């Protein structure tokens, strides 16, 4: 991944958060909120916050769902 790359992922409520901030000028408090919300989702799903969240969300959108949950995870927030 390059230094300027930005990766969005959805939190437990379906809101878009940033997993990777790249070179965006975002203050530390805002970054902390994004990290905390994605950590909550990862904890809910029993996994680490990673690129897999991003990939699962992209797959979910193509299937008409809002959040990409792993098999056996909590229900989708549609």
Image (tube, rainbow, N blue to C red):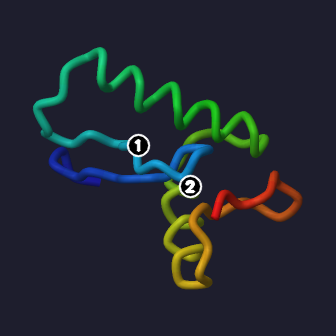
* Residue 56 - label: none
* Residue located at (45% from left, 29% from top): 35
> Could you say whether the residue bearing mark 2 is in a helix, strand or loop?
helix
Label 2 Cα neighbours within 10 Å, binned few <14 / some 14-19 / many ≥20:
many
Counting from the top left corner in percent of width and height, residue 8 is at: 37, 53
> Could you say whether the residue bearing mark 1 is in a helix, strand or loop?
strand
In the displayed structure, would residue 51 be above or below residue 43?
Answer: below
* Residue located at (59% from left, 81% from top): 64
Label 1 Cα neighbours within 10 Å, binned few <14 / some 14-19 / many ≥20:
many
Image quarter in which the C terminus is found:
bottom right
Counting from the top left corner in percent of width and height, residue 58 is at: 49, 72
In the displayed structure, would residue 71 be above or below residue 46?
Answer: below
Q: Which residue is mark 2?
A: 53
Query: Do the residues under discs 1 and 2 have CB atoms within 8 angstroms?
Result: yes
* Residue located at (75% from left, 45% from top): 45
Q: Which residue is mark 1?
A: 19
Q: Is residue 51 left or right of residue 4?
A: right
Lower sequence index among marks 1 and 2: 1
Residue closest to the far top: 29
Q: Quadrant of residue 26?
A: top left
* Residue located at (61% from left, 84% from top): 63
Q: Estimate the spatial distance between the alpha carbons at disc 1 and disc 2, rounded to whole Å.
A: 9 Å
């Amino acid at each position: 991944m390059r230094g300027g790359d930005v990766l969005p992922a959805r939190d437990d409520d379906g809101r878009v958060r940033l997993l990777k901030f790249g070179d965006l000028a975002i203050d530390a408090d805002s970054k902390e909120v994004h990290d905390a919300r994605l950590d909550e989702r990862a904890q809910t799903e029993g996994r680490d916050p990673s690129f897999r969240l991003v990939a699962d969300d992209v797959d979910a959108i193509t299937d008409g769902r809002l959040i990409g949950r792993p098999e056996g995870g909590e229900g989708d927030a549609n």
